Amino acid sequence: MTAQTKTLLLCLCAVGLIAPTRADETRRRQLRGGSQQNVLDPKRNQSSTGKGKTVWDWIQSDGVLIKMLTIDSATFDKGDVLINADVINDCTSTFLDPPDNYGIPHCSAWAFMKQGLVPMVYNYPPQSQHQVGIVVANSQAVTEAVTRMHVIDGITIGRYSDGADRVDVGSEDWDACKDTALNRRYVCAYEDIGPRRCADDATHLWAPIGSDGSYWADQFIMDSTLQKPDFNRWHSNQQQCEFWSDSNGWTNFQNALQSYYDKVKHLSDEGLLPDFDTDADNGIYLENEVNMEKPVEDVRDLLLGDGQPLLAVIVQDNMCYDQLPASARERCSDYYTNEDNENSMRHEAVATACRLRKQIQDNHHILLPVLNASGVLTNSIPDADRWQQYRESTDPRDWLSANEIDCEKYSQQD
C-alpha cells in the first residue's frame, strides 16, 4: 500500500475482553499498553464459516486476512462498499499522480494475521489510527487468491506488475541486466544470503534470503556490507523482494516474518534501532502486506462465496498512547488537540463499523459481528517488547476482543 492514498478518520468507542482470570486480564492490559478498556454489552460472537470455525479459531489455525478500509459516511452514498474499487482495489497504479497502467492490476492489499505473529495493520498515525476493517478466513480459496506477499508493507502502489519498485528498478544491483530489468520478475531467492543480482535465466531479479526465508532481515534490515542497521522506507519497504504464491511461498514468507521480528528484538536489546519519524510520506511502514489481483466484483464474490470466508467487521479503538511504544507516546499530543478530539474519532469509527455491518446485512443477508481490535499496535514504530509478548501469546483475544460491540448504542444512518 502507500501512505498517500490512505487517509482515514475512523474507529471506535470501546469494547473489552472476556477475562477468565485476573492474571489473564493483567497480561492483556500489558499487551494493549496498560489502559483500561470500556466494555460494551457482551454478546459472545458466534460468527463462523460453514465449517463452524470462529474468527479466533482461524487465527489459531490457518490465519486470517485483514483489510483496513478508507471509508467514511460519504462512502456509503456511492453504494456497496464491497464493490467500491477505490476501497477494495486500493494499491493499483491508477492512484498515482499522474496515474499509469504499469502497476499491479486490480491490486488489493491485506495484512496476514495468525497466532504467533504481531498484530499490525495499515494504521499509520494520526490519520489512520482509528479505522474500520474486515476480517476474512484464510481458506483454501482465499489462499489461492493471494498472488504475492511482503514481510512489511510493499508500497505496492509504486511497484511494476513484475514486482520491482519504480525507482529501485534503476538500482546498480541490476546493472548487469539494466536493459531488461523492467521486464523481469522480482522475487525472493531461496538460497544463501548474498547481494541482489540479475538471475541467469534472463527473466528474474533475485534477492537471496536463505533457503527457507530466514535471512530476509539480514538482506532488508541490515546493510550487509557495513554490517549495521539499514532499516528505513527505501531499503526495507521499497527494495524488499516479493514472495510469490508457489509451493514454498507461504512457508518461507512466514519464516521471513519471524526473522524480521527476531532482528528487531536483537537491535532493540542492543540499543541499535534507529529513530523512526512518523512521516506518512517518508516513514517506514511495518505491517506485512499480501495482495490479491482481482477486479472488485470478483473479490466480493470470493468473500461471500463457498464457506463464507468473510468473518467480521473490526474497528480499532485503542487510544494513540496504547498503539505507540512508551518512548513515542508524547507524540500523541501533537496528533490530537485533546483527548476529546481523539474520542470523537473513535466514536465516529465505531458508528461507521456498525453502518458497514448493516449494509452487508441489507445487501448480502449476512449478519457479521463488529469486534474491537483493541490490541493492534502501530505500523509506524517498532515496539520490540510488546512484539515479543504477542509472539509468545496463545490467545488471539489479547488483541481481538471476544465481546461483540452493541451497535444498537450507535445511531445508524440510512
Image (cartoon, rainbow, N blue to C red):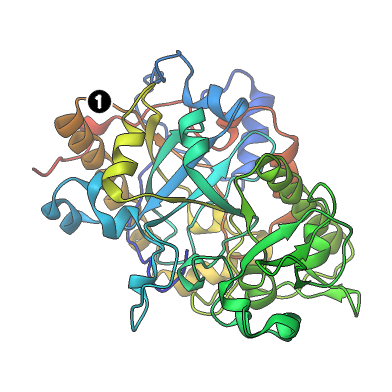
Q: 331 or 376: which is nearer to us? A: 376
Horizontal side of 139 relative to 271 (left or right) equals left
Quadrant (top left/top right/bottom left/bottom right) for the C terminus: top left
Point 65% across, 59% down: residue:
325
Q: 35 or 48: which is nearer to us? A: 48
Q: Amino acid at mark 1?
A: Ile
Residue at numbered disc 1: 366
Of all residues, the one furthest to the top in this rendering is 52
Horizontal side of 271 relative to 310 (left or right) equals right
Point 86% across, 58% down: residue:
266
Badge 1 marks a residue whose secondary structure is: loop
Task: Indicate whether 227 appears above or below 178.
Answer: above
When asked about the image quadrant of residue 117, the answer is top right
Point 47% across, 21% down: residue:
54
Q: 364 or 182: which is nearer to us? A: 182
Pointer 1 local density, CA inside 10 Å: few below 14, some 14–19, many at least 20: some
Image position, residue 20 (x, y; %): 59, 18
Point 37% across, 57% down: residue:
106
Image position, residue 91 (x, y; %): 41, 63
Q: 312 or 298: which is nearer to us? A: 298
